[in-house]
Amino acid sequence: MNAAVPMPATHRPGTARAPWLLSAPAFLLFICLLLVPLVLTAVLSFQVFDHASGVKNSFTLSHYAAVLTDDYYHRIFWRTFWISALTTFICVLVGAPEAYVLSRMRSPWRSILLLVVLAPLLVSVVVRAFGWSMLLGPEGLVNQAIRAMGLPTMRILYTEAAVIIALVHVMLPFMVIPVWTSLQKLDPGVENAALSLGASPFTTLRRIIFPQVLPGVLSGSLIVFGLSASAFAIPGLLGGRRLKMVATVVYDEYLHELNWPLGAAIALTLLLANLVLMLSYNRVLERSYKKSMG
Amino acid sequence: MSKNGPIALLFNAFVIAFMMAPLVIVCVVAFTPENTLTIPTTQFSLRWFRAVFAHSDFVQSFRNSLWLAFLSATLATVLAVPAGLAIARHSFPGRDFLNGLFLSPLIIPHLVLGVALLRTFSLIGATGSFFWLALAHVVIITPYALRLVLASVAGSDRSAEQAALSLGASQATVFRRITLPMILPGVTGGWLLAFINSFDEVTMSIFVTAPSTVTLPVRMYMYATESIDPLMAAVSALMVALTAVAMLVLDRVYGLDKILVGHR
């Protein structure tokens, strides 16, 4: 997550204590409410669960075995994976060009429209999910428009389509931000040079702009995929009772089935899959950064 | 720089419409006089807003959320300022580890945090405690406060502090009279961003709230899974309005574009 910064020699002996003292309150809180809970949950995921008596103090691998072998969980992990991958793909297709178009806007519009695209980020995801459930419902605006065109009512709400549409809406800012940031670093002189040397606008876009924003697109994809894979409120409200994703299944195990160890195993499998993906993707990212630097 | 063509502008209009659609529909439907989720065409009514304020569960949750966001944002800022100063100003063994640890709630799914905290709270008997819920929120919003503190500490000039120190001011005086005023925009911006994120949080909170500490987004989530009526639209419209106000203040204090995209 953070590149190791080369450590300059400490100025005076004994100065190592001051920064640790300053960080101590936050550090203590993060140990008690982040590291310890994660360890406790890891332990819990290996404990036996019995529907009559609850969690027992004996070791078992059965929860992980269930997650890894049961078809039901395979289907849910697979659905979560492809929905997140498709969401990421759409966010790249929409978010990257949108950031490019915005960066070419003239002065007041540029920042106003950028804020319009990014501001929904600060509105609660429950509100946005509810907005989409109104738009996509059988009597919603989208279906009214479809009927006005003479087509039959489509069932969108409580399908994968609704979940993906709302996920794209929630995730798009996370794609626009990194692409916008890498566009800001771009030297307009290079683009003008390519154009004045006779390259077509399309060639300029493909050979000059695209390679330079690729790292932004890649890091945006990483964030979008990770957040989509663990999204809870969107599949919960727009997927309905039958269309489960990993997060909603974990919720069910915890609060309806009360099988906490199994829920913990599913949640930790998700965390682990996410971390593995991020680390391997980071490798690719670093390589592409090196390439773009020449 | 060359201008956008008509296709690019049309595309842009579509994206803007897509981003605004769910928020606009929520705000419009909230004014319906009907009993169902319809778009008001001839009459506008405030009956559903009145219904929200008469609904004691929503009012209670709203109060919980406001108080929770205020308390946890304040605590997070109090923790983030010294930690930020330590990380930005000193090089010490463990610096990268601390920085990574404090920012890690940004990449650990809130679902996992919710599950982990639920287990911890039930072991120590803290379920239903407002105080522990606030501490849980502090963990997930500290990264937001910390990032703005780090940015403003990195951008501040140290010579004024060194001058004050060499003229005999105590460390405490230097912090109070020089350092804090210099990084204040970052600190207040960080507080507001932390406040908004705590106020909006649903995924972790749904695991660790008890009936008496249910926050507004959790209440809305549970309400929306059971029934869908204009009451939900009215609450949502109020949340949109509140967020808009917070954003305006944030823009005044720190600059919204700086927070969202890092720089101008």
Image (tube, coloured by chain):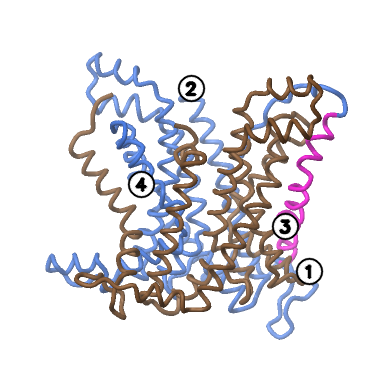
Which chain: brown?
B
Amino acid at the residue labelled 1: Ile
Q: Going 71% across and 58% down the picture, which residue do you hit?
A: A38
Local crowd size for mark 2, using a 10 Å CA cut-off: few (<14), some (14–19), many (≥20): few
Can you tell which mark lies on residue A293?
A: 2
Q: Main secondary structure of the magenta part?
A: helix
Which segment did they paint magenta?
A15-44
Can you tell which mark lies on residue A116?
A: 4
Local crowd size for mark 4, using a 10 Å CA cut-off: few (<14), some (14–19), many (≥20): some
Q: Against A97, is A10 above or below? A: above
Q: Which of the two marks, 2 or 4, is nearer to us in this view?
A: 4
Amino acid at the residue labelled 2: Met
Helix, strand or loop for disc 1: helix
Is residue A25 on the magenta stretch?
A: yes
The Cα atoms of the two marked residues, 1 and 2, are separated by 52 Å
Q: Going 30% across and 28% down the picture, which residue do you hit?
A: A205
The Cα atoms of the two marked residues, 3 and 4, are separated by 35 Å
Q: Position of residue B122 (x, y in %)?
A: 73, 71
Q: Where is residue A140 in the image (x, y as percent from the top left)?
A: 27, 69
In the figure, residue B132 lies in which quadrant? Answer: bottom right
| Residue at mark 1 shares a chain with residue at mark 2 | no
Name the residue carrying label 3: A33
The Cα atoms of the two marked residues, 3 and 2, are separated by 41 Å
Helix, strand or loop for disc 2: helix
Amino acid at the residue labelled 3: Leu
Residue A193 lies left or right of residue B159; in this view the side is left
| Residue at mark 3 shares a chain with residue at mark 2 | yes
Can you tell which mark lies on residue B124?
A: 1
